[in-house]
Amino acid sequence: MANISINFCPADGYQFRADEGICIHCGFNRANKVLAQNHNVNNKNPWRKLLWVKQEYPDNHVDSSFLEELQKNANLRTYDYWTVVMESGVISQHISSIVIFIAVFIYLYLDMLSAQNLIVIGTIFTSIGYIFWDLSILKTDPSYEYTRRQTAKGAILFFATLLGLSPILKTLTKDTSSDTIWALTVILFLANMLFHDYGSGNRTNIKFPGSLSTNAAIFASVLLASRLPSNSHVFGLMSFAVEWFALFPIFRRYTKSLSANFNVALTCLLFFLATALFLRISKAIVILYIFGNTFITFCCPFWLIWIQKYKNEIHGPWDEARPKLQHTRSAADE
Amino acid sequence: MGGVESHLYQLSQRLIQRGHKVIIITHSYGNRTGIRYLTNGLKVYYVPHMVIYSEATLPTIYGFFPIFRNIVLREKIDIVHGHQAFSSLCHEAILHARTMGMKACFTDHSLFGFADASSILTNKLLKFSLSDIDHVICVSHTSKENTVLRAALNPRIVSVIPNAVVASQFKPDPGAQDQNSITIVVASRLVYRKGMDLLVAAIPRICQNHAKVRFIIGGDGPKRIDLEQMREKYLLHDRIELLGPVMQHEVKNVLTKGQIFLNTSLTEAFCIGIVEAACCGLLVVSTKVGGVPEVLPRHMIIFAKPEEDDLVNAVSKAIKMIRLKEVVPTKFHDEIKEMYSWVNVACRTEKVYDTIWQMKTPPLMERLRRYYGCGVWAGKIFCVLVAIDYLIWMFLEWVAPREDIEIAPAFPYQKYRKMCQMAEKDEDDN
């Protein structure tokens, strides 16, 4: 037994020189190992997860260390119920905004709301929203002041163009039958809902988040506009659509980053507005809407938390590594 | 020739030398079709098959069965050994072989994650063909863990048999090295998975820190443009040599020019490249991913995390070691020769064949039971596929009976070898 000599370090394979006692890489003591080996009942070296060394184990040996490096659900996030409920607000807000838009269209269509009123209300709220936005941006970024003029110019130009295009938009899909229009609108609003950018991450680099969703909504409004009786109606609906689907989500995202309480208030406000508007149109839809919203806000978070116990994500040494580059440094160099 | 192809060729050659009969079935490559004989009577069938994209074939499941049955019957095959999880031909061959009651074995050469759509799909496919397999061979312990998880296998039927190198082809050549500077060699496909982004980021920093360091980069791929742009941007034309595609037999000449080999792979089941490099007498610097830590002893390799900073540090450490002559990499050759030889691989593979040869062939019912356990929906679909395969087999047995299939004459291995020896002798005499 005494003449067993260890020529390689078992931990990292370092080859010992004749006079060396300790591995320079890991500090493994050669002398200890000889003692330990004498105590080993089977007199077998422990199995090592190495390929270059010939071992006394069969090729299909399964060691106790098998799958030791397996990590299960390494980046699991446990959710708090009420946090998820709060976060689900963005979805119910968006659904409410679609419902409100449809209600506004029906009001226009049934002549319960005049086009002038809609334009006035839209303009007032957009202006209030812009002033609010302007004031809060100014606090963080004073240079913003100079873009005001440009914004105003752009807005006037845009709405003037829209006004000019109204007769064209009105007749664009006039020949298509109403059934087709309703069906297409439903599909487009569903697309708008599905592709809307609900995320709350930083999107300074993306100029128009969720452009597919916005386009779907605008297209739907163009289709709906063809059912309206006059050019001013078309202009009213289209300008409202632009304000509602392009500008309002930006505002909502902004308020969400400002204050959680305000966001909850906005969610409730939109919810009640949608309910109130649809009460005069259809009670069944109101009930459906309330149930749907309750489900999304209160049941789905519970569902998500419950289903998490089935989450089984595995990571291990076989995963493709993500290269880490020093981007900030190289950017500073240039 | 990649790792898998050379593995097939070398393993077959050793098995033939050990007295087995080996044939290879693959799909046709361009005008390379039909049956061809390689060195020592290794017979290769190039099956006509539609290639869709970069030498991958369209999975047809049953289209390959008649020709496959014909080949295995006329060659009197006992064991079917499939290679590579990506190959649909391999999965089909295993399925048909099992249907025909032959033994099947599978070698996995790559690692897969569990997260993205393509690996989920391949894993499902792997689970299907490995539900009824006799034995699986993996090239590293990490690869074994991966395969066991992916295909839900019993780890006892998975053996680890590493790849090997033909040491005589990778002899160190100290004369080829540039004595005035330290040369770092990179030889791999220039693709994302080989960590080319890391390389592009690290090279300028290494060149900045060490004045007498040169790079030789062999290989081709989509990331070559990035490397060229980097060279352009930092004006390193005199210090970075981009060789473009390198033929297999030229790899050795490229490797021996350097003192350090750099591997930046992001995922690697075995990485034959670093073994070849060490065999050529190069100190290896590699990212510590996948099976790489198992491959070489610590005095031959310096590990780095797949991070730019750590990689630069590791290369600097290697340069220092070479400069101060702390290591003598040319001695690695003899050590590697002992560690990885194809004879050893063939012996171990033979052992696997012996064990599966003694296993009983399960009846159809048992096979269906195994497939049924694959999943709620998948299990049923798999059962249907296997049942249809069985019916097709029965149909083929009826349409083209076994007795009518002509048996191919066995290649006279003994005679061939004797003639080769005689020819060599003649040459020597002349």
Image (cartoon, rainbow, N blue to C red):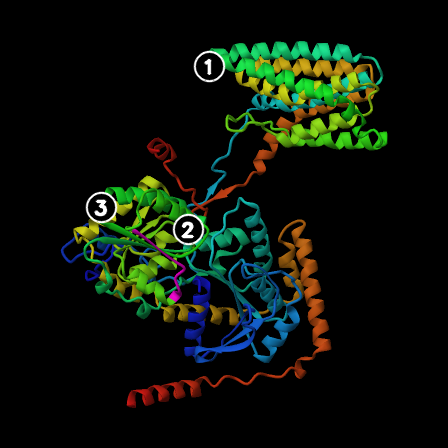
Residue at the disc numbered 3: B211
Q: Would you say the residues marked 1 and 2 are in contact, meaning their CB atoms lie under 8 Å apart?
A: no
> Counting residues from the N terminus, which is met first, the one under dot 3 or under dot 2?
3
* Residue span colored magenta: B240-248
Residue linked to disc 1: A143
On the question of residue B152 being in view, the answer is no
> Which quadrant holds residue A117?
top right
Residue B365 at what x, y percent from top left? 67, 63
Please indicate whether residue A119 sits to the left or right of residue A86 in the image.
Answer: right
Q: Residue at x 37, y 53 (%)?
A: B292
- Disc 1 from disc 3: Cα separation: 47 Å
User: Which amino acid does the dot numbered 3 rest on?
Assistant: Ala
Q: Which mark is residue B224?
A: 2
- Chain of the residue under label 2: B
Graded by Cα atoms within 10 Å as few (under 14), some (14 to 19) or many (20 or more), the crowding at tag 3 reads few
Q: Nearer the viewer, residue A282 or A146?
A: A146
Query: Could you say where residue B224 lies in the image, as x and y percent from the top left?
Result: 42, 51
Residue B245 drawn in magenta: yes
Q: Residue furthest left?
A: A19
Chain for numbered disc 1: A
Seen from the viewer's position, the closer of residues B192 and B240 is B240
Q: How many marks on residues? A: 3
Q: Is residue B100 visible?
A: yes
Q: Chain of mark 3?
A: B
Instruction: Find residue A130 and report its image quarter.
Output: top right
Both marks 1 and 2 on one chain: no
Which residue type does callout 2 highlight? Arg
Q: In the image, is residue A102 part of the stretch drawn in magenta?
A: no
